[in-house]
Amino acid sequence: MNTNMKMNLGTIASPLGNLLLVSDDREQVRALDFEDHAARMRRLLRESYGAYELTAKAPPAAIAAALERYFHGELNALDAIVTSSVGTDLQWRVWDALRRIPPGETMSYGELAVEVGIADPRGAIEVGAANGANPISIIVPCHRVIGKNGDLKGYAGGVHRKRWLLEHEGALTSAARPAITLELPGL
């Protein structure tokens, strides 16, 4: 665990509300979360880095521009953004696999478990926990993981935002709205 990590905190407007962007001096994204979930973001930063310092600073222009392009329909605009986060081996495997799910596509928790090499039938629960610990919303697209029956399972930013993101990417149409469930993901 790094201690006294120094990072920058900026705010970016989005159609879903303000986003809080935490980046380092190399302009790597360390965290991205919705402003109304700042407490969750700070908890994840504390768990990852121990003591840390945030300095208010405008977000890096390239990252802010990529997010703006994404929200204006250029769905692959986030692919080049460099992220850096602290996690377990399983979390890193899950987060890496999430970045390989193309916009407009979804994967079930069980399918993602197989993708990252978990053969255990309860692997979907482990994948769900890794998803829930993802500190970098949208760029590391945990919103693209859904229940095996198509239900929208929990999303740290709120299931209404998950639905919006999936509709924005073309993975859902507003006419074909799956149910929202809040229980632990199943296979």
Image: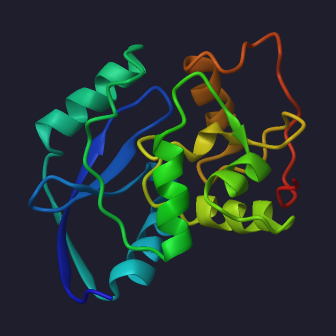
Q: Is residue 10 above or below residue 123?
A: above
Residue at 39 percent across and 79 percent down: it is 48
User: In the image, 75: left or right of 132?
Assistant: left
- Report the front residue among 107 and 26: 107
Instruction: Between residue 182 and residue 103, name the one nearer to us.
Output: 103
Q: Residue at x 42, y 54 (%)?
A: 136
**Snapshot quadrant of residue 152:** top right
Judged left or right of residue 135, residue 179 is right
Of all residues shown, which one is farthest toward the left?
A: 25
Q: Position of residue 65 (x, y in %)?
A: 21, 28
Q: Position of residue 20 (x, y in %)?
A: 35, 51
Q: Quadrant of residue 6?
A: bottom left
* Residue occupying the point 41% across, 42% down: 139
Q: Is residue 56 above or below residue 1?
A: above
**Residue toward you, 91 or 31:** 91
Q: How is the image coloured?
A: rainbow
Query: Does residue 178 lie above or below 116 as drawn?
Result: above
Count of labels in the image:
0
Q: Which quarter of the figure is the N terminus placed in?
A: bottom left
Q: Position of residue 2 (x, y in %)?
A: 26, 86
Spot occupied by residue 15 in the image (x, y as percentages of width and height):
46, 26
From this viewpoint, which residue is outermost toward the top? Answer: 175
Q: Residue at x 70, y 38 (%)?
A: 107
- Residue 5 sits above or below residue 63 on the image: below
